[in-house]
Amino acid sequence: MRPFQGNVALAQDFDSLSPSKYFVHLAALNRCDDEYKILDTNVLGTYNVARHCLKNRIKLLVAGSTKHYGMYAASKRVSETILTALLPCGLVGAYLRLPNVFGPHCRPYYNSFVSTILHHISIDEPYEHLIHDPFAEIRLLHVSDLCKAIDTLLTGCLHDFAERHGSESPFSIDFWNAGEFRITIGDFCRIAEGDEPINSPYACQRTKHLIQNTLDWYKNNAKSNKTHRR
């Protein structure tokens, strides 16, 4: 797999790309003081990627979101609408509706608040002020499960994957049965602290293992993670 070197918001940056079978579009701007840059990257950038894939008959995988509020969520909704409208024009691929993705290399204060919580725990800093409702349920997907799903999509059939994982179409794919799990914020923190969950009895050993392993990664990279603080 070759990384794309350029700015997805600039159509001319695609001119020098060599042909490929797939294009995995993970680039996105989560937050920025200038919200127009979010629109440029997430909407115009996605359109430019789709246009390139249509022109060169490349299958496209796009990282989307299940979020419902904010400019980031709005930009992802618009992108999904654009991509869906291009399907009759010949676009082939999948839009991955991703929940909160966590794991190694997820940046605290940026990617997701659970990454920020794990970072605080790893350096023995208080994190309670980050939590508004410990009983609120969150949807999480570990980055390793996301990579496995992408690999399955690239090597298998989009229709079969969507059908197997309960999505309503082969284009927009949810991840409830593909590695995603649900847990209360309070129980997530309890597991990270080494305690047993109280309100999420369905939290399996693998869930605990993923949370603990991610915490270990933050502990081992605590110094570099501090540079990401906003």
Image (cartoon, grey):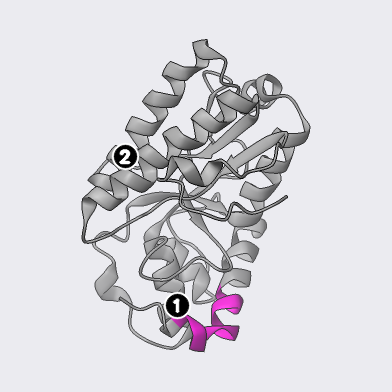
Give the side of residue 153 with respect to residue 131, left or right: right
- Mark 1 nearby-residue class (10 Å; few <14, some 14–19, many ≥20): many
Magenta span: predominant SS is: helix
Q: Quadrant of residue 78?
A: top left
- Mark 2 nearby-residue class (10 Å; few <14, some 14–19, many ≥20): many
The magenta segment is: 215-225
Where residue 81 appears, as percent x and y from the top left, is 37, 24
Q: Amino acid at mark 1?
A: His
**Measured along the vertical axis of the image, is residue 19 above or below residue 196?**
above
Q: Which mark is residue 119?
A: 1
Q: Which residue is disc 2 drawn over? A: 75
**Measured along the vertical axis of the image, is residue 141 above or below residue 74?**
below
Query: Which tag, 2 or 1, sits closer to the chain's start?
Result: 2
Where residue 207 appears, as percent x and y from the top left, is 60, 57
Taking the spot 59% from the left edge, 51% from the top edge, the residue there is: 4
Give the side of residue 25 with respect to residue 9, left or right: right
